Amino acid sequence: MGQKAFSGQVIELIGDLGVGKTVFTQGFAAGLGIKDAVNSPTFTILQVYEDGRIPMYHFDVYRIGESEEMLEIGWEDYVYGDGVCLIEWADQIEDLIGEIPAEKVMRVEIRKDLSKGTDYREILGRIPAASGDEA
């Protein structure tokens, strides 16, 4: 997916704690050609990676109390900037996500299925119809 990412794209990452949102982001970053270690920015909220094909803005909004906090850190500069945004816990800021043109937003939901083993994950994606790609 990182190989096909484009500037202005927003990837919503939805899933329970420990399901693999950051691991997904690490793989996405590799597809962009990012060599830096990718860790969850739980306490810093945002980590910027600029050494790939396009910049990657990795948000973890788990600790965000209100959407206004995102505006204070320059949310719009990143969402409408030159890179791709990956947002862990994006369902907590749906009001802000809803303001982004739908054709730029992709939703990725990661679920564990313990009936199939502790390491099994199901990944569901919603890709905008305008993208021309299939899931």
Image (tube, grey):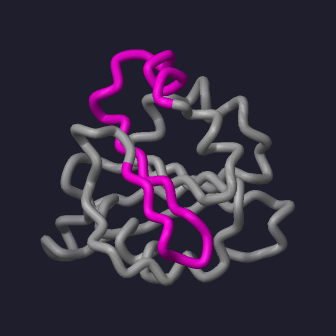
Q: How many marks?
A: 0
Residue under the point 46% across and 48% down: 87
Residue under the point 70% across and 67% down: 6
Q: Is residue 10 left or right of residue 49?
A: right
Query: Which residue occupies the extreme front position in the image?
Result: 51
Report which quarter residue 95 is drawn in: top right
Residue 52 located within the stretch drawn in magenta: yes
Placement of the N terminus among the 4 image quadrants: bottom right
Magenta part of the chain:
47-73
Q: Is residue 17 above or below residue 30?
A: above
Placement of the C terminus among the 4 image quadrants: bottom right
Residue under the point 82% across and 60% down: 129
Residue 77 located within the stretch drawn in magenta: no
Q: Is residue 30 above or below residue 95?
A: below
Horizontal and vertical percent for residue 3? Answer: 60, 82
Horizontal and vertical percent for residue 102? Answer: 77, 45
Horizontal and vertical percent for residue 64? Answer: 35, 25
Horizontal and vertical percent for residue 104? Answer: 74, 52
